[in-house]
Every structure is written in C-alpha cells, then in structure tokens.
Amino acid sequence: MVPVDEYCTALASELEARFRDREPSEVDTIYLGGGTPSRLGGVGVARALALVCDRFPLAEGAEVTIEANPDDVTEGAVDAWLQAGVNRLSIGSQSFDDDALAWMHRTHDAAGIERAVATARSAGIANLSLDLIFALPDALQRDFAADVERLLALDPDHVSLYGLTVERDTPLGRWVSRGQAAERDEEGYETEYLAAHEALTSAGLEHYEVSNYARPGRRSRHNASYWSGVPYVGLGPAAHGFDGRTRRWNARAYTDWRDLVGRGRDPVGGDEELTRQNREAESVYLGLRTDAGLRLEADERDLVAPWEVAQWVTLDAEDRLRCTALGWLRLDTLAAALTHRRCR
C-alpha cells in the first residue's frame, strides 16, 4: 500500500526545511516523475501538487506533467489530476508485446495501454506521451516493427524512445553476467533505433532530441529546460536539482529522505559545483543532443569534417552543428571529441 499521508507530510517538511526563508516564485513547468507518482492516486497527486504550488505557484500556461503506469490511469484518477492542474500525461507503455512486458515485470499488458490512452483522452487529457523501449534481447523474439505500429495507431502527441541498457546491479545485469540473457549487439541496437526514427518521423513527429519525438507544438517544455541548462528544483527521494552552478541530489532511499525531513533537515545526499571543464562538457553535450544544435567555433571545422562525410552531422551556413539520427547514436563520442578540443 502506498503511504500517501506519510509521503505528503514528508514533502511538506522538505519544502519547509529548504525554502522557509524564500519568497514564493512562479514556475513554468512541474514534472511528477522519477518512479511511479501515479501510485499516489488522484487525491495524493492533488495534495502533492498543492504543497509544491504553495511555494512555487504556476505561471499562466504552465506545463504540468505526471508519469503514470497504465494500471493507474482510471477515470477517477484522471479527473482528480486535471482538477489539480495536470495537463500532460506520460504513460509508461514500454512495449505492446505481452511477452516482453512480462519479461520486464510490468503489471500491464498491451490492452491495458490502449485502455489507459482511451481513458485519459475521454477525461480530457489533450497532451499525451508514450514511451517505447528498443533493443530487447533477441531471445524474446519481439516484433519491434509491430510495436511501433501499435504505438502510432494510438496517435500520441509525444514519444520517448529508449534503448535497453545493461547495468551491473540490476536483475538484467546479473542475468547477463551469468549467461542467462544476452545484450543486443550494436548492429541490432542501431537497426531498431533507425527503424523507429523512420516510422515516427514519417508519421509527422519531429525528432527534436536524441530520445524524443513530438507533434508540432507538443515538445516537452520541462525536459527542454534540462537540456538548455535552466535551473530547477528537485523534491523527494533521489531528486536532483541545479541552481546554475551547483548540482545537488537528495538522499536516495525513501526511508532516509523521510527520516531526514522528519527531523527538519535538508535531505541533501550530495552536491557538485561544476568546474569550467564540466560546464564546457555539458554545453557541448546538451547542444548536440537536441535539434537546436551547437554553435561551432572557427577552429573546429577540421574536427567535424569526417563526421559530415559519414553523415553523422550537418553544418549550416551559420556554423550550427546538428546531429543526424546516425550521429545521435554516436553522441558520446562526438561530444567527447569536441569537449577535448575546447578544453585543451
């Protein structure tokens, strides 16, 4: 059972501990994510948003997003979210293959995704995002093209496309280390990414960031703030924030966060002041990961010339460098090379 009362009490305590001496200031976006905030239900989400908006009132036309499991998208919950100010819903669909969903330990099936979309739309959510995971193990025999077709049949306003990554301290990481599962090779990863890119852009969605596609006018304003280096506040366990120079993160475990704020303490788990090199690296990386691109310096044309030949990037008349879909697959390599040149 989700401890809604306990969570909201702890959230109120964190806001008081960190911002008691700060005047309320308007915000343009709020994003309830980083887990399963929809498990708070309609009333719980409304309470959490009211607490945040008391300190950070919404600007006119603000974007308010909640991430939701398909199982949590009920008529009553959506009505409560709308009344609380939510105007954008991101549904964790991940796949439309029931065997793949079961392998990922998801509690919903493909039909549940379709029901959630229908429920959200009939209740009045006008801005809807779905996500899709690619590069699942070959052993699952998932038909990725069929997955993309079923997603597009729901006509989402926004799509987030994520490649499955193997991390050491996860069940998948342990399965791979024991030989019980095999990670997709680079060729398979690239093939599915490019296939999704072709299908999504052909359907009229703009590929505006390495992992994100949107209908015109439906780009995620909140995520765009991260990519442009705008300061933001993070609240709750493991939440990250940035004030323009320093990154901070809260205690990761829920119980640690709850106990710290319960004692009236700032639940900070750590922070990092960005060095000049850090800021340069972030500027390059963030610029290259969006379709806004990165302004190239005069002495960098020789460095990017081979990338243009390989069709990883394009360079316009104003020396703005933009990645192609092929280039976004090599984003880390491109960003590292440019950062090294700028910081030498």
Image: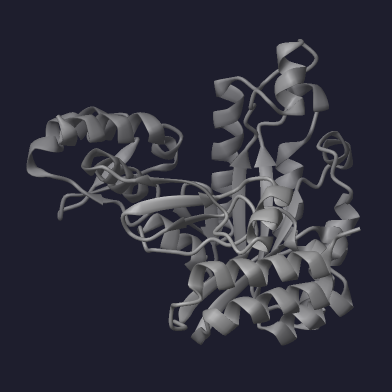
Q: Along the horizontal axis of the image, is 75 left or right of 166?
A: right
Which sits in the foreground, 157 or 231?
231
The residue sitting at 35% across, 58% down in the picture is: 229
Image coordinates of residue 269 in percent, x first then y, are 54, 46
The residue sitting at 24% across, 38% down in the picture is: 277
Image coordinates of residue 37 in percent, x first then y, are 73, 62
Image coordinates of residue 217 in percent, x first then y, are 49, 73
Q: Is residue 78 visible?
A: yes
Q: Along the horizontal axis of the image, is 64 left or right of 151?
A: left
Residue lying at the far front of the rendered structure: 263
- Asked if 183 appears above or below 162 in the picture, the reply is above
Name the colouring of the figure.
one colour
Residue lying at the far top of the rendered structure: 179
Which sits in the foreground, 200 or 238?
238
Question: Which part of the image, by quadrant, shows the N terminus?
Answer: bottom right
Question: Which part of the image, by quadrant, shows the C terminus?
Answer: top left
Which sits in the foreground, 211 or 141?
211
What is the quadrant of residue 235 in the picture?
bottom right
Q: Along the horizontal axis of the image, is 239 left or right of 301?
A: right
Residue lying at the far left of the rendered structure: 298
- Asked if 118 appears above or below 191 in the picture, the reply is below
Q: Is residue 217 visible?
A: no
Image coordinates of residue 178 in percent, x first then y, are 76, 11
The residue sitting at 53% across, 53% down in the picture is: 212
What is the quadrant of residue 3 in the picture?
bottom right
The residue sitting at 70% across, 53% down in the picture is: 35
